Image (cartoon, grey):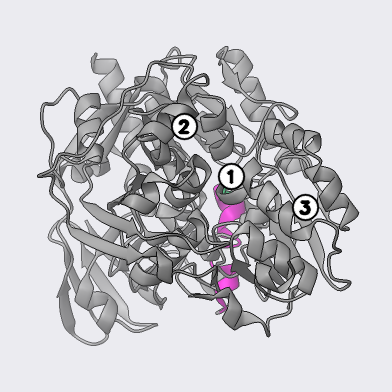
Amino acid sequence: MTITEKILAAHSGKEEVSAGGLLNAKVDLILANDITAPIAITEFKKIGAKDVFDKSRVAFIPDHFAPQKDIKAAEQCKMLRDFSKEYDLDLYFEVGRMGVEHALLPEQGLVVPGDLVIGADSHTCTYGALGAFSTGVGSTDVASAMATGECWFKVPESIKFIYYGNLNKWVSGKDLILHTIGDIGVDGALYMAMEFEGETITSLPMSGRLTMCNMAIEAGGKNGIIVPDGITEHYVKGRAKREYKFYSSDKDAKYAEIKEYDCSKILPTVSCPHLPSNTKPAAELSSVTIDQVVVGSCTNGRIEDLREAAEIIKGKKVAPDTRMIVIPATQQIYLQAVKEGLAGIFVEADAVFSTPTCGPCLGGHMGILAKGEKAIATTNRNFVGRMGHPESEVYLSNPAVAAASAVLGRIGTPEEVI
Amino acid sequence: MILKGRVWKFGNNIDTDAIIPARYLNTSDPDELAKHLMEDAGKEFPSKVSAGDMIVAEANFGCGSSREHAPIAIKAAGIQAVVAKSFARIFYRNAFNIGLPIFESEDASGKIKEGDEIEVDADKGAIRNITRNEEYTAKPIPPFMQELISAGGLIKWTKKRIEAS
Ligand code: SF4
């Protein structure tokens, strides 16, 4: 069996499962945010359950339109807070304690290897980086699981992605996943598990692994997953709030397909509007002028990402016709960035340094694009209207390329500014 | 169950930001959401769509976010069913969970044109194009999904299970 099949089997009390089978599995953690929890709460109340299945396993995180951007958003956030009080939930994160959900939960050790996690947010697939099975579901799924502790799944087929060779300078997990999506397309892994492995992955830091699994959904994947190893152990030791278990794939596990990538051929990569699969090397896009740069999100808002952007922009200025918005994904990352002097580097470069929020990533607030404006962002989606006006454009990149583009006022590579 | 209606045709990879842009997600009121359905996709869709219409699209319909607001908005606008070559998986499960009928069909989505009148026999998985006098087949709906539909969606299904235990 694959690691995905093993985790699903273990959570549904089965010895063996195989792709295509439908099953009901026990969940270790359930997540919802200020957009999806309100519907989950309304639906949960319709079920008539006396209580949630486990107070310590339902996480409500107001991060999308929080700090509350308008009255309607405030009402939605309040629903989370009221419900959390009423049901005495352990994992409610108020503004000031919250962060972008998919950065916050692994950081706080609330998701661990071997877990089965569902979240009413498509990027729940991020935690596969820890060797967990995690996937995005709808609010109704969350409502039902909050009552029963279970969720229905179709066991996905797996595709194995093998990465070998050394990474080029300024190439990171983001470039590997953008390159992969560019290769297989936005439905290239539809309904499937994307299992990442190979020597390049073995030496890829946890931040890069989280970025890769985060974007499995952009290829249509059900989950991204990496078999846990020493890097995983190092990351979870000291933070894990629960016992964890390392699963691995059997030698004779079945894969729908095996893809291989020579990483020495992968350059800093950008996804052009309006699909993540529309990729080109950053170096070929130097004619694209940029109005806004965003460094942040559940994809690339971790401390490593901020360090990378700061390294490029240190001692320089954001181009006169460009604005740059840097958003650490969690409070802990924010504080760390202040301590390391990264916040100062950004502010001195004329960038904005924001409190944690999803903000502009989904066109919510804190940096919305006007008609005709172009942004380069370290986020994960560049659909029509994703960051604002339907006639604005979003390019996706890694933090180094984003920071270099901020300095240049157009898309560019780190080599051009360093 | 037989569903009959006029078709709105869409292409590949219609994402959830196109179905219901995030700027309207500060509410989950179905009627509010329906007012902005497919607003950015051109066609002046929200003002022209009428109850009983159908959506037919190409591959990967509903890709992107997990927002249940997408199928909710479609249902609230009175769309009876969505037919596509394939669906993104979270949209697929959301549709069944909230009771929006959806059908996967290779040839139907290729041949049906905007404005066609179609009839879907949900039990048989047969799609008839009245305008063009053609027939297509949809993939059968797995037994568990049928159970969800006949229970009236996931919430009612769960309620029954809890009451029975
Ligand atoms: S940062 Fe963006 S992609 Fe991540 S959870 Fe927030 S809105 Fe979604």
Task: Residue A210: give x, y in percent of width and height.
Answer: 48, 44
Q: Residue A43 — which label?
A: 2
Residue at the spot x=11%, y=26% of the render? A15
Work out whether disc 1 and disc 3 sit on a shared chain: no
Marks 1/2: CA–CA distance = 12 Å
Q: Residue A366 — which label?
A: 3
Residue at the spot x=49%, y=43% of the render? A205
Work out whether disc 1 and disc 2 sit on a shared chain: no
Q: Residues within 10 Å of mark 3 (few under 14, many from 20)?
A: some
Identify the chain of the residue marked 2, using the numbered disc in the image.
A
Q: Is residue A166 magenta?
A: no
Q: Is residue B129 left or right of residue A375?
A: left
Disc 2 within 8 angstroms of ligand 1 (CB): no
Q: Residue B28 — which label?
A: 1
Question: Residue flagged by tag 3: what amino acid is it?
Answer: Met
Quadrant of the frame with the N terminus of chain A = top left
Marks 3/2: CA–CA distance = 31 Å
Question: Residue flagged by tag 1: what amino acid is it?
Answer: Ser
Snapshot quadrant of residue A129: top left
Pointers 3 and 2 in contact (CB under 8 A)? Answer: no
Quadrant of the frame with the C terminus of chain A = bottom right
At numbered mark 3, what does the secondary structure look like: helix, strand or loop?
loop
Residue A200 seen in the figure: yes
